[in-house]
Image (spheres, helix red, strand yellow):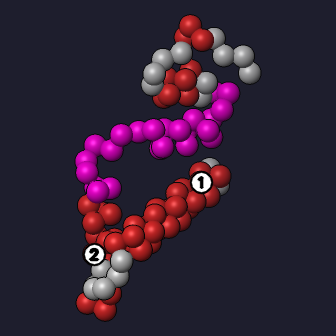
Amino acid sequence: MPIDLSSTTKNPLDFWKRHSKKFPLLCKLAKRIYSIPATLCNVEREFSSAGLIINQRRTNINPEQIENILFIRSVQKLQFLFISVSFL
């Protein structure tokens, strides 16, 4: 697909808005990925997840391990997002 470079902007959502009829599913996915959340709920969820990982039984867990566990959880959530979009 040829892309007119003169019509490109720094905002990727502009591209998807112009091509939403040609790529409806990718457009929906792009909106979910590139949209900025209105609140800081994602940060609160990460702290909540970290609190569930670090409990009295796991007080000696390495901080790097905590980061790895949180990363794996976020990747699993992202995979779920891709699966749910594919069913649309």
Specify which label sits upstream in the sequence, 1 or 2. 2
Instruction: Using the rendered image of the protein, determine whether residue 17 is visible from the camera's viewpoint.
Output: no
Identify the residue under disc 1.
82
Tag 1–tag 2 contact (CB < 8 Å): no
Q: Which residues are magenta?
A: 21-43
Quarter of the figure with residue 65: bottom left
Q: Quadrant of the N terminus?
A: top right
Along the horizontal axis of the image, is 64 left or right of 13?
left
SS of the residue under disc 1: helix
Q: Would residue 65 be seen by someone viewing this image from the given angle? A: yes
Q: Report the residue at 62% width, 40% height from top.
A: 25
Give the x, y percent position of residue 16. Answer: 55, 28
Residue furthest to the top: 6
Query: Looking at the image, which residue is at 46% across and 64% down?
Result: 71
Q: Residue furthest right?
A: 1
Q: Which mark is residue 33?
A: none
Q: Quadrant of residue 54?
A: bottom left
Residue 66 at x, y percent in the picture: 38, 72
Amino acid type of the residue that numbered disc 2 sits on in the rendered structure: Gly
62 up-or-down from 11: above or below: below
The residue shown at (53%, 38%) is 30
| Residue 31 magenta-highlighted | yes
Q: Amino acid at mark 1?
A: Phe
Does 55 sit above or below residue 25?
Answer: below
User: In this rendering, would 73 be left or right of 21?
Assistant: left
Query: What label sits on residue 51 in the rendered view?
Result: 2
- Percent position of residue 74, x then y: 46, 62
Name the spot of residue 82 as percent of width and height, x first: 59, 54
Q: Residue at x 28, y 43 (%)?
A: 38
Q: How many marks?
A: 2
Q: Secondary structure at mark 2?
A: helix
